[in-house]
Amino acid sequence: MIESNYVDIGYIKDLDTLKSAINTEDFTKRSVRDSLEGTPHTDTRTIFGLWDMFTDGQSASNEDIIRRYYSFIEETISKVEKHYGYMFCELRSLCIINLLSGGRIESHKDDDDYRGGKNIALYNKCHRIHIVCKTNDNVLFDINGEQRNLKEGAIVEVNNLNTHRVFNNGYTDRVHIVLDLLPHKGRYRENLGSLPDYVYKEH
């Protein structure tokens, strides 16, 4: 979706409130995402708020998680829309990812070979947005060899179509909210009817 490895979108206004919304007890169980054999995400613990990226019937939603983070999701969507000049973006997935202290996300990219077969997800159409909730100075996000330490409160788009990995070499866990946003003229179609083409700007 983007040509660079990282795009800086902005910062969350109320980082303290965002941090207080995180419940460490939510991360005590492993999800399918981080427990599958051979997954790059073994050292993570993931909570799904909305998972609708795939059209193979694997979908999930958690209204409690959506409600808890709703204001931050809306703030982020608004900033992404403003940054790119979109009128609407559709939320296609929402998850909270805890990378354990001393852990790593192994090298991978989210393309047709991801998950061991043809991936019919919308990775090449969605903006992959990270909201940095909690981190430390020893967390490095690496995309094609370009490493960055993403700061708390930052809203950053990452190019997940390129090879990427993450190292948490610190003594505290790293927590990100990860969104997939699809620029889509039909976001409010159910309520407003068909929207004219000019409200949607292709990128």
Image (cartoon, rainbow, N blue to C red):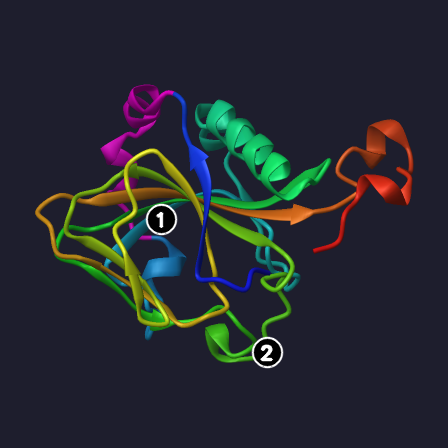
In percent of width and height, residue 52 lies at 60, 51
Label 1's element?
strand
In percent of width and height, residue 125 lies at 65, 59
Which residue is at the front of the view, 182 or 32?
182
Q: Is residue 148 magenta?
A: no
Left or right, residue 9 beside residue 197:
left
Query: Looking at the image, is 48 positioned above or below residue 20?
Result: below
Query: Looking at the image, is 120 positioned above or below residue 69?
Result: below
Which residue is at the front of the view, 90 or 201?
201
Left or right, residue 73 beside residue 90:
left
In percent of width and height, residue 196 lies at 91, 40
Question: Which of the two discs, 1 and 2, labels the residue nearer the N terminus?
Answer: 1
In percent of width and height, residue 17 lies at 33, 19
Quarter of the image that includes the N terminus: bottom right
Query: Looking at the image, is 67 positioned above or below residue 110?
Result: above
Query: According to the image, label 2 marks what residue?
Result: 118
Left or right, residue 132 beside residue 190:
left
Please state which amino acid type lies under the numbered disc 1.
Thr
What residue do we see at 22% from left, 62% from top?
Answer: 104
CA gap between label 1 and label 2 equals 23 Å
**Farthest residue in the left direction?**
171
Query: Looking at the image, is 94 positioned above or below residue 64?
Result: below
What residue do we see at 19% from left, 51% from top?
Answer: 100
Quarter of the image that includes the C terminus: bottom right
Please state which amino acid type lies under the numbered disc 2.
Lys
Magenta residues span: 14-30
What residue do we see at 45% from left, 28% from top?
Answer: 69
Label 2's element?
loop
Please tell me how crowded label 1 is: few (under 14), some (14-19), or many (20+) other residues with Cα within 10 Å.
many
Q: Is residue 21 magenta?
A: yes
Query: According to the image, label 1 marks what residue?
Result: 46
The overriding secondary structure of the stretch rendered in magenta is helix
